[in-house]
Image (cartoon, coloured by chain):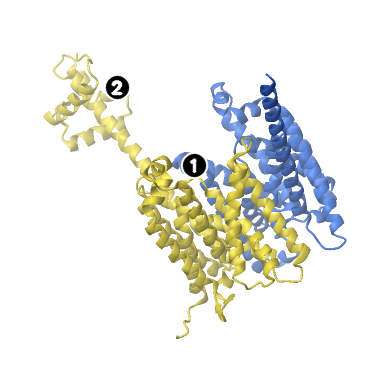
C-alpha cells in the first residue's frame, strides 16, 4: 500500500471531520429526545471505564480499554435512569450526581494506583487530536490508529441510522404510537445509548470529554434550525460537522491554537450563522417577514380608507393626496411610500389631487370588509 | 479546610434552588464556560486572581444568558442549547489557552490550567478570604430574597401572575450561582463544582419537604463534605498524593447514598406499619 502523505493540518481536519460526522447522527436523536446532556455525562464517565479497565488488564494499549469505556457509558445511562425512579430527583439532578461521582472516583483511582503510568489527566481532559493519527491499539499483531476505529464507527452509525430510520423516527416523536405499532421504544432507547457510548469512546481520544457534548449537540441543533424534515436535519448535521471541523482545524493552524477547541468554536460560529440566516426560522427571515406584514397592513389600511369614503360627499377631502397624512395619522414620508406601492400594484390611480380605487383595489378592500362582517359603510 | 467547607456550604445553599428549578447543570455550564473568560482576561493583560475570576464569571453568565435567549427565539430544547454553547465556550477557552502558552512570554508563571482541575491544597489565605466573603454574601442574599425565590422555585407562573419581576429574579439567582461556581473553580475544578451544587441539595431533599430545612441541610451536608473530603485527602496524602477536589466530591456523593437509603428505609417502614395496622383492623 503506498504511504499516503498529507499536510498535517489536512490530516487533522480529516480526523475531526470523521469524528463530527460520527457524532452528528446520534446527536440529532439525543437532542430530539431531550437527552443532550447525557452525552456530556457519558463523555466524563468514560475516564472511569478506562481507568477500571486499565486496572483489570494492566495494559494501556489494550482494546479492552475501549470496551470498558463503552460499558461505562451504558452503565452511566442505567444509573441515571434508576436514580430518576426516586420521585424527589429529576433527570438533570441525576445526571449532575452520577458523572462527577464517577469522574471523581476515576481521578482518585488514578492518583492512588496509577501514578507511574502515563495517564495524564490533563491530557485526557483536553483531548489531543494529534494523537488520533498515531497507531495506538494492537490487535493480533497489527497496530490500529484510532482514526480507523473512528471511521468504522462513523460508517456503522450511518448504516444503523439508515437501517432503523423508521423505528428511530417513530420512537422519538411518538413513543405511544411506536408501542402500538409493535416497535419497542426501550430497545431503541438502549440501542441509541449504546451507539452514543461507542461513538463517544471513539471520539474521546481526539476531542476530550467536554467537547464530546459539542460534537454531539452543536451540529444537531444547527441542523434543526436549517430544516424541518428529519432527513434534512440529519444531512445538515453531518454537513455542518464536517465544515466546522475543517474550518476549525485550519484556523487553529493559522493562529497556533488547540485544534479540538477551535473546531468547537467554529461549530458555534456555524450555529450563529444558521440562527441568523436559516431560510425558515432564521432571525433575518423573521425580521423580513414582519416588515412585509407591516407593509401589507399599511396598503390595506389605505385601500379601506378610500373605499369607506368612495362616492360620499367627504371624498373630496378624505381622498385628497395632500390630506391623507391627517386622516391616516401617518407621517408624510410613509404616506408617500404607501401611495407609491399601491400605485405600482395597480390598486389605486391618481385623479387630479384625488386618489381613486381601481377595480382591483376595490376588490381588495371588499375582501377585507367581507372578513370583518357587519362593518357599516358610510 | 475552612475554605472548602465554606465553599461547599454556599454551593449547597445556592444549589438547592438550581435543583428545584431543574437547572442542576447550570453550574456545569458556567464552570466550563468560565475557562474562556479566564483565558480572555489573561490575554487582556489581567494577572490578579480576582480579575481572572471576574472574567470567568462574565463568560459563564454570558453563556447562560445567550442559551436562554436562543432557546426563546428558536424553541430548541434548553438543555441542548446550554450543552452546545458550553462546548463552544470551553473550546474557545482551550484554543486561547494554547495560544497564550505559545505567545505570551510570562504565561509559564501563571498556571492557568489549574482552573481545570483545581488545587484545594494550594488555597492561600487570600483565596479563603474571598470564599468567606462570597459565602456570607450568598447567605445574606438568599435570606433577603427568600419569599420571592421560594415562589420562583415552585411556581414561576404564579410568581409572574402576582406581578413579580420573574426575569429579574431569575437573573439574580443565576448571578449568585455563577459567583459561587467561579469562586469554587480554583479550589475543586470544573467537573467537581457541578457535584458540590447538586449532591448536597439532592441529599437534603431526601430528608424534608420544606425549603427552609432543605437549604439548611444542604449547606450543612456541603460543609461536612468539605471538611471530611479535605481530611481524607490529607490523611491519604501521607501515603500517596490524592487531589482534594475528588475526595470532597466522593464524600458529597456518600451523603447522597446515605440519604437515599434513609429515605428508602423510612418509606418501607411506613408501608410495613400501614400493612400491620390494616391487618389488625
**Circles 2 and 1: CB distance less than 8 Å?**
no
Q: Which mark is residue B71?
A: 1
Residue A286: percent from the left, percent from the top? Answer: 37, 41
Using the image as rendered, state which of residue A361 and residue A269 is in the foreground. Answer: A269
Q: Report the chain holding disc 1.
A: B
Residue A81: percent from the left, percent from the top? Answer: 58, 45
Colour blue maps to chain? B
Q: Residue furthest bottom?
A: A2
Identify the image quadrant of the C terminus of chain B: top right
Using the image as rendered, state which of residue B232 and residue A70 is in the foreground. Answer: A70
Residue A143: percent from the left, percent from the top? Answer: 56, 79
Q: Residues within 10 Å of mark 1 (few under 14, many from 20)?
A: some
Q: Quadrant of residue B210?
A: top right
Q: Is residue B87 left or right of residue A168?
A: right
Residue A41: percent from the left, percent from the top? Answer: 60, 52
For mark 1, give the secondary structure: helix
For mark 2, give the secondary structure: helix
- Asked if residue B58 can be seen in this view, the reply is no
Structural distance between the alpha carbons of marks 2 and 1? 43 Å
Q: Which mark is residue B103?
A: none
Q: Is residue A149 left or right of residue B146?
A: left
Q: Which hue belongs to chain A?
A: yellow
The residue labelled by disc 2 is: A326
Q: Quadrant of residue B268?
A: top right
State the residue at coordinates (29%, 23%): A328
- Relative to residue A47, is residue A32 depicted above or below? above
- Asked if residue B80 can be seen in this view, the reply is yes
Q: Nearer the viewer, mark 2 or mark 1?
A: 1
Q: Is residue A288 left or right of residue A58?
A: left
Q: Residues within 10 Å of mark 2 (few under 14, many from 20)?
A: few
Amino acid at each position: 500500500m503506498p504511504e499516503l502523505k498529507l499536510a498535517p493540518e489536512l490530516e487533522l481536519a480529516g480526523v475531526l471531520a470523521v469524528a463530527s460526522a460520527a457524532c452528528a447522527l446520534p446527536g440529532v436523536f439525543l437532542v430530539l429526545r431531550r437527552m443532550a446532556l447525557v452525552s456530556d455525562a457519558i463523555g466524563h464517565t468514560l475516564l472511569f471505564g478506562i481507568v477500571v479497565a486499565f486496572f483489570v488488564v494492566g495494559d494501556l494499549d489494550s482494546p479492552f480499554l475501549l470496551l470498558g469505556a463503552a460499558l461505562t457509558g451504558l452503565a452511566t445511562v442505567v444509573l441515571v435512569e434508576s436514580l430518576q425512579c426516586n420521585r424527589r430527583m429529576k433527570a438533570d439532578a441525576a445526571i449532575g450526581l452520577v458523572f462527577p461521582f464517577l469522574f471523581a472516583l476515576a481521578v482518585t483511582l488514578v492518583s492512588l494506583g496509577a501514578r507511574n503510568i502515563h495517564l495524564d489527566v490533563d491530557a485526557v481532559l483536553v483531548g489531543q487530536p494529534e494523537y488520533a493519527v498515531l497507531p495506538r491499539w494492537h490487535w493480533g499483531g497489527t497496530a490500529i490508529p484510532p482514526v480507523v476505529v473512528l471511521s468504522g464507527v462513523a460508517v456503522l452509525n450511518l448504516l444503523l441510522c439508515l437501517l432503523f430510520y423508521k423505528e428511530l423516527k417513530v420512537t422519538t416523536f411518538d413513543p405511544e404510537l411506536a408501542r402500538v405499532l409493535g416497535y419497542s421504544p426501550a430497545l431503541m432507547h438502549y440501542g441509541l445509548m449504546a451507539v452514543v457510548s461507542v461513538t463517544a469512546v471513539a471520539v474521546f481520544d481526539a476531542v476530550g470529554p467536554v467537547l464530546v457534548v459539542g460534537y454531539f449537540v452543536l451540529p444537531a441543533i444547527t441542523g434543526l434550525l436549517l430544516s424541518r424534515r428529519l432527513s434534512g436535519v440529519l444531512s445538515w448535521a453531518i454537513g455542518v460537522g464536517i465544515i466546522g471541523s475543517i474550518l476549525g482545524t485550519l484556523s487553529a493552524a493559522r493562529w497556533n491554537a488547540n485544534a479540538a477547541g477551535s473546531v468547537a468554536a467554529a461549530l458555534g460560529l456555524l450555529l450563529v450563522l444558521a440562527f441568523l440566516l436559516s431560510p425558515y426560522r432564521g432571525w433575518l427571515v423573521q425580521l423580513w417577514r414582519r416588515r412585509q406584514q407591516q407593509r401589507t397592513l399599511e396598503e390595506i389600511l389605505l385601500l379601506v380608507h378610500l373605499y369607506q369614503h368612495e362616492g360620499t360627499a367627504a371624498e373630496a377631502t378624505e381622498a385628497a393626496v395632500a390630506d391623507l397624512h391627517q386622516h391616516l395619522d401617518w407621517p408624510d414620508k410613509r404616506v408617500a411610500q404607501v401611495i407609491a406601492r399601491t400605485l405600482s400594484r395597480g390598486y389605486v390611480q391618481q385623479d387630479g389631487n384625488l386618489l381613486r380605487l381601481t377595480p382591483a383595489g376595490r376588490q381588495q378592500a371588499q375582501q377585507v370588509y367581507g372578513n370583518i362582517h357587519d362593518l357599516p359603510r358610510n | 479546610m475552612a475554605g472548602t467547607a465554606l465553599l461547599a456550604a454556599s454551593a449547597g445553599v445556592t444549589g438547592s434552588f438550581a435543583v428545584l428549578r431543574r437547572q442542576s447543570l447550570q453550574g456545569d455550564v458556567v464552570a466550563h464556560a468560565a475557562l474562556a473568560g479566564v483565558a480572555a482576561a489573561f490575554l487582556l493583560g489581567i494577572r490578579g486572581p480576582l480579575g481572572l475570576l471576574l472574567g470567568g464569571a462574565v463568560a459563564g453568565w454570558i453563556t447562560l444568558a445567550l442559551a436562554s435567549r436562543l432557546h426563546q427565539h428558536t424553541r430548541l430544547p434548553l438543555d441542548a442549547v446550554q450543552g452546545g454553547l458550553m462546548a463552544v465556550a470551553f473550546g474557545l477557552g482551550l484554543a486561547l489557552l494554547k495560544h497564550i502558552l505559545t505567545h505570551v512570554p510570562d504565561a509559564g508563571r501563571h498556571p492557568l490550567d489549574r482552573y481545570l482541575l483545581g488545587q484545594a491544597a494550594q488555597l492561600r489565605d487570600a483565596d479563603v478570604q474571598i470564599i468567606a466573603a462570597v459565602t456570607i454574601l450568598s447567605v445574606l442574599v438568599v435570606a433577603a430574597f427568600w419569599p420571592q425565590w421560594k415562589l420562583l422555585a415552585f411556581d414561576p407562573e404564579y410568581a409572574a401572575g402576582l406581578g413579580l419581576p420573574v426575569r429579574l429574579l431569575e437573573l439574580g439567582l443565576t448571578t449568585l450561582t455563577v459567583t459561587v461556581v467561579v469562586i469554587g473553580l480554583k479550589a475543586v475544578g470544573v467537573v467537581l463544582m457541578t457535584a458540590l451544587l447538586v449532591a448536597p441539595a439532592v441529599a437534603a431533599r431526601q430528608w424534608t419537604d420544606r425549603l427552609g430545612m432543605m437549604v439548611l441541610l444542604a449547606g450543612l451536608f456541603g460543609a461536612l463534605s468539605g471538611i471530611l473530603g479535605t481530611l481524607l485527602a490529607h490523611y491519604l496524602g501521607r501515603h500517596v498524593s490524592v487531589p482534594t477536589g475528588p475526595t470532597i466530591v466522593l464524600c458529597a456523593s456518600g451523603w447522597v447514598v446515605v440519604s437515599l437509603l434513609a429515605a428508602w428505609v423510612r418509606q418501607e417502614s411506613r408501608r410495613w406499619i400501614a400493612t400491620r395496622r390494616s391487618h389488625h383492623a
